[in-house]
Image (cartoon, rainbow, N blue to C red):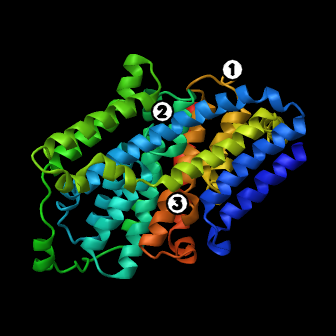
Amino acid sequence: MVTYLISVFIFGYLLISLEEVIKINKTAVALYTGVISWVVYVVSSGHVDDFSEELTLELGHISEILFFLMGAMTIIELIDIHRGFDVITNRIKTTDKRKLLWLIGGISFFLSALLDNLTASIVMISLLRKLMDDKEDIKLYAGVLIIAANAGGAWSPIGDITTTMLWIGGQVSAENIMKTLFIPSVISLLVPLIILSFTMKGDLHRVESNKKDVLKKEKVRGSKQMLIGGLSALVFVPIFKAVTHLPPYMGMLLGLSMVWIMSELIHFKKDEQEKKPFSAVYALSKIDSSSVLFFLGILLAVGALQHANILYGLAIWMNATIGNLDMIVFVMGVLSSIVDNVPLVAATMGMYSLQDFPMDSQLWEFTAYCAGTGGSILIIGSASGVAVMGMAKVSFGWYLKRISLLAIAGYLAGAAYFLLINNWL
């Protein structure tokens, strides 16, 4: 059974990594891998009738993450269709390359912490297109954007899917992860920004605004209200969990309901046809359902490995081979730049129990940092990187040549600070 399960998982993982080559959507492969993993686990064990409770329990844990993601995505889409993010992007006027470098990095960092790194990247790459028309400039700032978005997502419980998984799973608390990882995450961004600042000078060539385009883009009613309301709903989730002790997805669903009601009130006087493009129902149709199903497939597959005690055996082997837990996590962070960090973190959660490593242990804190920022080393290592790769036409080779060393420098500096503070000081 162990050999079959590992073979199915590795084969599925390989197909996911080669999505661009084989032209098969990774979500389809992830779902196939997840279901087949459970089929192999159940059939090989020979006790088919005994597994319904295990699978139901596993689906319950997975559903918490999926409902959380769907709620967050819908709130973000509601802000976007009301053009709430234009309130931020329209205020950037500078043409100085260095100032814009720090401005893009800073906004991306904090926007990613409030929303998530994928959404922040999509919003900011849209901004870059409005600010500049030189393709090389766009690609360079897009590279900085990826580093900033991943760094910003690592220290926030709602900023990166891996940190969210650890938070929902009870491995980290919202207050502690923000307090512990904020400075390492800032350092992982500051180092690349400082290095780039010495190489950049002069002004950017701004895109000439077209008056006709400006006129076409009518102002949407309630854009500021939806921006404030949506961001408040997202920030409210950790507070809700701390006060009520209910799971985070309950707070997210409550926030979604409030923002949904707000959108209905803003367009109260319009008829159904006029309200439709600004409704939560329309926002739900625009969320990335493919990503939600991808997480479902991956987490199902990892769940099968966990129930078969394969991840526990892997933890024992890594402890015996590498020995040092910090080094194990550091290596996994580097690996997250090659393969998706979701299954890596899910595997880590299965390898080490909360009994041995309770909430807010150094293992979980360092895992959140490494999985979040390590994905910046290669452009394919994070959801934000893949999104920017498509939207800004950044090639794998260009990113490897111009950005990867900067990302490595930031990753090493942040990790060194974290270990210095926690292990020696």
Q: What's the residue at 35%, 55% (across, down)?
A: 108
The label number, if any, that marks residue 193 in the structure image: none
- Residue 302 position by quadrant: top right
Q: What's the residue at 70%, 54% (across, down)?
A: 32
Task: Say which quadrant the N terminus sits in.
Answer: top right
Q: Which residue is mark 1?
A: 355
Q: Which residue is mark 3?
A: 407
- Residue 66 appears in the rendering: yes
User: Of tags 2 and 1, which is closer to the observer?
Assistant: 1
Tell me the SS state at disc 3.
helix
Q: Is residue 382 above or below residue 60?
A: below
Task: Say which quadrant the C terminus sits in.
Answer: top right
- Residue 317 appears in the rendering: no
Few, some or many residues within 10 Å of mark 2 (<14, 14–19, 20+): many
Q: What distance separates the C-alpha of mark 2 from that of mark 1?
A: 19 Å
Which of pointers 2 and 3 lies earlier in the amino acid sequence? 2
Foreground of the two, 254 or 356: 254
The kind of residue on which mark 2 rests is Ile
**Proximity of marks 2 and 1: CB atoms separated by less than 8 Å:** no
Foreground of the two, 227 or 77: 77
Give the total of numbered labels: 3
Residue most extreme to the top: 244
The label number, if any, that marks residue 177 in the structure image: 2
The kind of residue on which mark 1 rests is Gln
Foreground of the two, 383 or 274: 274
